[in-house]
Each structure stands twice: as C-alpha cells, then as structure tokens.
Amino acid sequence: TDRVAELDGLGFDQVPVTSVFTAGIVYSGDVHLPFRNVPGKALVNDFLSNAVEKYGYRYVFTFNIYPYFDPTLKIAPPKYTCESAIRIATCFEDGCLANKALVLARQKMYQLTANHTQ
C-alpha cells in the first residue's frame, strides 16, 4: 500500500495496480476460499480480498500460467507419455491445459469478487 500511495501522490491514482501470482494459487483453494490460504506460508486469498476491497476495479488480477506445471499432468506410459504431456500443455485448442487454467482462474476470481467484469 505504501508503493501505491507513492504512485497516487505522483498523480497516478487512476493507474491499475496488481501483484503477479503463479497459476498454482488457483489449484489450491477450497469451496469456501477460492485461493490458497495457508497460515505461515501463503495468505493469498486474504491478500486478494483486501486488495479488491481497497482498490476495487483498480486492482487487476495477474497470473503467470505455466501449463506444464499443471498438477493433473501425468506421465504413465503407454497412455500418458512426455510427448502427450507436452502436447496438452502447449496447445490452445479446447481441452488444452492453458485454456483450462484460464477458465479456472476466472471462476476463482468470480468466487472471490462475485463480479464477472473484475
């Protein structure tokens, strides 16, 4: 908040603010909390709730999506191979992991904000 206050003081009070997270935070929430909240490790849900409450639409969600780290990827030949894992992690068609991660992130954002446009 100090850095944002500094920006505001310089006349940038309409500039969006963000904090970048890996997509791993979208895989670790639960039915009550959309994002990871583990005391002593990562209070991501608390952080995001506070950021949205304080900055509203000015807060912009930012995720680095790396589908090859998706926890559902399996390598178990002959059905699941390195090649099949790379294929599903690097494509952008229906059913590909990047698309699934983006949809999941959007669902979690809605779960947190109850707003489809934020």
Image (cartoon, grey):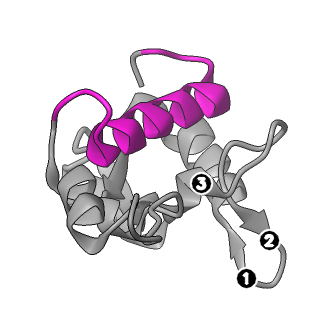
Check if mark 3's residue and mark 2's residue have beta carbons within 8 Å.
no
Residue beneath the point at 65% across and 51% down: 35
Check if mark 3's residue and mark 1's residue have beta carbons within 8 Å.
no
Check if mark 1's residue and mark 2's residue have beta carbons within 8 Å.
yes
From the image, which quarter does the C terminus lie in? top left
State which region is magenta: 93-116
20 left or right of 37 in image: left
In the rendered image, is residue 59 in sight?
no
Residue 21, image x, y percentages: 42, 64
Q: Is residue 107 one of those drawn in magenta?
A: yes
- Amino acid under disc 3: Tyr
In the rendered image, is residue 73 in sight?
yes
**Which numbered mark, 3 or 2, is in the foreground of this view?**
3
Q: Is residue 61 above or below residue 106?
A: below
Q: Which mark is residue 38?
A: 2
Residue 81, image x, y percentages: 32, 68
The residue beneath circle 1 is 41
25 left or right of 38 in image: left
Q: Is residue 115 one of those drawn in magenta?
A: yes
Residue 105, image x, y percentages: 46, 40
The residue beneath circle 3 is 27
**Which numbered mark, 3 or 1, is in the foreground of this view?**
3
Q: Residue furthest bottom?
A: 40
Q: Quadrant of residue 66?
A: bottom left
Residue beneath the point at 30% across and 62% down: 85
- Amino acid under disc 1: Lys
The answer to which of marks 3 and 2 sits earlier in the sequence is 3
Disc 3 element: helix
- What is the chief secondary structure element of the magenta stretch? helix
Separation of marks 3 and 1 at Cα, in angstroms: 16 Å
Residue 19, image x, y percentages: 39, 62
Q: Is residue 8 above or below residue 80?
A: above
